[in-house]
Amino acid sequence: MRGSSVAVAVCLTFIHRAAATLDIISLYTSSGATIVEASATVILPSVPDPITGDLSLWNAIQLDKDFIQGGSENAPAGLDYWTNLGSNWCNFACARTANAQVGKPVIAAPGTRVRTHCQGQKGIIFHIFVEYAARPCAAVPAHSWENVSVILSSPNPNWKHPGGWNLGATGGEMTTSDSGKT
C-alpha cells in the first residue's frame, strides 16, 4: 500500500546557544499509519564562528525508541570523531539502535546540498532538529531544508503539521498530490 507523501521547504533562522536537542519539525503519525520512507535535503550553512562545542543538523525517523538518521556535524579538532573539519561539515547516516551503525562520513563545504534518505522501517515520528552535544556551542548559522518528503504506510489525507514551525523557522505547507495516498 502506498502512503501519504508530504513536502515542505523550511528556512531556519539563527538558533541560540544551548546544550540540547532542539526540534524544528516533529511530525507524529496517527490512525495506525507508520512512516516507511523519508528524505530531506539540508543546504549547509557556514560553520559557527567561533567553532565551539559539537553541533549537528539532523533529520530522522524515530522508531519506538531508536532513530534512523542523517546528520551534518561540525566540532573543534579533537572533539567527537573528527580530527579537524575546519570550515567544513562532516555528513553521515547512522542507525541509533541496539546494533548501532554509522555510515561512511563525507566532508562537504558550506552551500553544499546534502540529501538523506531513510526507508525500510516503521517510524512513528519524523524529525528535523539541531543538536548541541557539547558545551559551549556557538549559534547555528541560518540554514535551509528543502525537498522534505515523508511516505506513510497507509493513506491519511488529514496528516499534517499542526500550527507554526518551531524556533523561528519559516516554511512551506505540507502537500499531497492525491489526497494522502502518496
Image (cartoon, grey):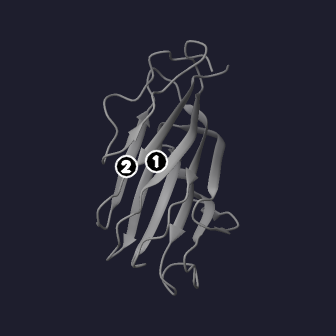
> Does any portion of residue 149 appear in the rendered image?
yes
* Residue placed most toward the observer, 70 or 63: 70
Image-based side of 7 in relation to 18, left or right? right
Say which residue label 2 marks: 23
Give yes or no for contact between labels 1 and 2 (Cβ–Cβ under 8 Å): yes
Q: Residue at x 35, y 72 (%)?
A: 138
Local crowd size for mark 1, using a 10 Å CA cut-off: few (<14), some (14–19), many (≥20) = many
Q: Which mark is residue 151?
A: none
Residue 152 lies in quadrant:
top right
Identified by mark 1, the residue type is Ile
> Does any portion of residue 66 appear in the rendered image?
no
Quarter of the picture containing the C terminus is top right
Location of residue 136 in the rendering, given as x and y in whole percent from the top left corner? 32, 77
Q: Residue at x 64, y 50 (%)?
A: 115
Q: Of the residues under marks 1 and 2, which one precedes in the sequence? A: 2
Q: In the rendered view, would you say 68 is above or below 163? A: below
Location of residue 67 in the rendering, given as x and y in whole percent from the top left corner? 52, 51
Q: Say which element carries label 1.
A: strand
Local crowd size for mark 2, using a 10 Å CA cut-off: few (<14), some (14–19), many (≥20) = some
Q: In the rendered view, would you say 67 is above or below 152? A: below
Location of residue 120 in the rendering, given as x and y in whole percent from the top left corner? 67, 40
Q: Say which element carries label 2.
A: strand
Q: In the rendered view, would you say 52 is above or below 73? A: below
* Residue placed most toward the observer, 180 or 64: 180
Distance from Cα at disc 1 to Cα at disc 2: 6 Å
Location of residue 180 in the rendering, given as x and y in whole percent from the top left corner? 55, 17
Quarter of the picture containing the N terminus is top right
Say which residue label 1 marks: 128
Identified by mark 2, the residue type is Asp
Q: How many marks?
A: 2
